[in-house]
Image: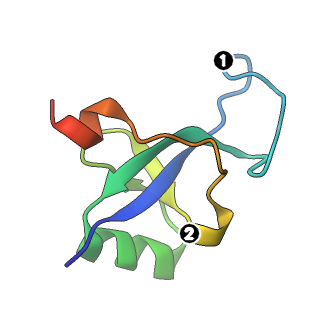
């Protein structure tokens, strides 16, 4: 099954407060296992990305245009 993508929730005081397309989520994108990602999306829960970061699965149309993929998710760690 294909991987899904997720964004990490913003951390107050750590991430800039510039907002953007996702006011409460921030990039980069993280790859999420397809089975776990679908379950998390249906239940609206966080899921662990391939790199270990906890993210929320987002629909493709909600992905900011300038969001790149996490290097650890892309190349493995």
Relative image position of residue 64 (x, y in whole percent)? 66, 51
Q: Residues within 10 Å of mark 2 (few under 14, many from 20)?
A: few
Task: Return the mark for residue 65.
Answer: none
Question: Measuring 73% from the left and 46% from the top, which residue is drawn there?
Answer: 24
Q: How many marks?
A: 2
Q: Residues within 10 Å of mark 1 (few under 14, many from 20)?
A: few
Q: Relative to 65, is 17 above or below?
A: above
The quarter of the picture where the C terminus appears is top left
Relative image position of residue 15 (x, y in whole percent)? 68, 23
Quadrant in the rendering for residue 61: bottom right
Q: Relative to 49, is 2 above or below?
A: below
Q: Secondary structure at mark 2?
A: helix
Identify the residue position indicated by label 1 in the image: 14
State which mark lies toward you, 1 or 2.
Answer: 2
Q: Relative to 45, is 27 above or below?
A: above
Identify the residue position indicated by label 2 in the image: 60
- Whether the residues at callouts 1 and 2 have beta carbons within 8 Å, the answer is no
First of labels 1, 2 by sequence position: 1
What's the distance in space between the residues labelled 1 and 2, CA to CA? 25 Å
Single out the residue that lies furthest toward the top.
13
On the rendered structure, is 72 left or right of 18? left
Relative image position of residue 71 (x, y in whole percent)? 31, 31
Relative image position of residue 58 (x, y in whole percent)? 56, 65
Q: Is residue 51 visible?
A: no
Question: Measuring 37% from the left and 39% from the top, which residue is drawn there?
Answer: 53
Q: Is residue 16 visible?
A: yes
């Amino acid at each position: 099954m294909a991987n899904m993508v997720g964004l990490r929730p913003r951390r107050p005081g750590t991430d800039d407060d510039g907002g953007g397309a996702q006011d409460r989520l921030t990039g980069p994108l993280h790859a999420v296992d397809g089975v776990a990602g679908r379950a998390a999306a249906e239940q609206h829960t966080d899921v662990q990305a391939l790199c270990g970061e906890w993210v929320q699965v987002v629909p493709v149309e909600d992905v900011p245009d300038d969001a790149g993929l996490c290097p650890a998710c892309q190349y493995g760690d």
